[in-house]
Image (cartoon, rainbow, N blue to C red):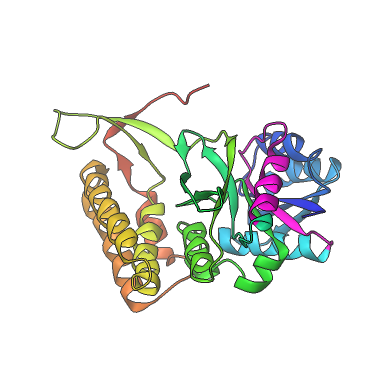
Amino acid sequence: MEPVWAVITSYRPDSGLLSAIESIRHQVTGVIVVDDGSEPAATPVLEAARATGAMVLVSEINRGIGNALNRGISAAIDAGAAGIVTLDQDSRVPHGFVDALTSAHRRACSTGVTPGPVVPEYFSQVRQAYAHDSHGNLLARDVIQSGMLLDSETVKSLGPMDEDLFIDLVDIEFELRSLDARRPAVAAPGARLEHSLGQRFRRRGPRLPGVPRVMMLSSPFRYYYRARNRVLVDSRYLRTHTRRLIRHSLRDYAYFLIVLTLARPRRSMWRLLSAGFRDGVRGSGGKMPQPLERVAATIRWAADPLPRPR
């Protein structure tokens, strides 16, 4: 697993990108930043990233997280990387993080297990590990791509991230594909990657049974991709991961109902969700149609944003 390179994806980055680079550059051989079609206003930050010694790749248009990851991973492998750690622009890597991931990978291999993605046990407050296998390896589930270690042989064997998904469930699809290839996701015991999982909102109005008062909400456009990609992923993997995907789908559909009640105007959110389901059934991927982007831009939340934790 030597050498290891870092791939950081960015979109409309601020100075936080430089902090992400600084947090990992001494733990890896090289850093690659892939900017996914930011406007010219991002140029000063990207030039500052280059000044740190990072390789910076820029897409002229927004092509989605799958494409950005694939560009960065491919460039890292071309540079000689045996392992690649993927990160978001707002990730901050603690000291010893990469060593923890590579140690978990090395231990799995020593027990005869060929791992797929290797992730920290904790992503913010979310525990990605769920069990130990018969060899004592800590197994992971529902992995998140930021903080993920991939070895180059896994990438060559499984193929690239699914660019048709564009955003949302790209990491889950890769994990399921890895499992079907008998390459389980492995967690590094005790490792943690702090990360903001989105904006917290406090719901207005009376208490409702089963509906939390405080919840995470994403940018409205994300719900088109979430609905569409849920259908696409289920259609591919429901036969081999039936219980898991039924559970995930029911959870998502319940969440979509809550999102629908909080969106204003609701008919616009319904249009996004229904278009996502319809395109998923049709097998359509890629970037959402521009008319739907304009619809998403009109949606606001009937909820009050809460301060982000410091």
**Quarter of the figure with residue 60:** bottom right
Note whether 124 is above or below 6 in the view shown: above
Q: Residue at x 40, y 60 (%)?
A: 225
Q: Which is nearer the eye, 8 or 56? A: 8
Q: Residue at x 64, y 47 (%)?
A: 87
User: Which quarter of the image is occupied by the N terminus?
Assistant: bottom right
Q: Is residue 55 left or right of residue 227?
A: right
Where residue 206 sits: x, y (%)?
13, 28
Q: Residue at x 27, y 51 (%)?
A: 251
Where residue 80 sits: x, y (%)?
84, 62
Q: Which is nearer the eye, 58 or 299? A: 58
Q: Is residue 89 a member of the stretch shown in magenta?
A: yes
Q: Which residues are magenta?
A: 79-108
Q: Is residue 181 a member of the stretch shown in magenta?
A: no
Note whether 129 is above or below 84 in the view shown: above
Residue 91 shows in the view: yes
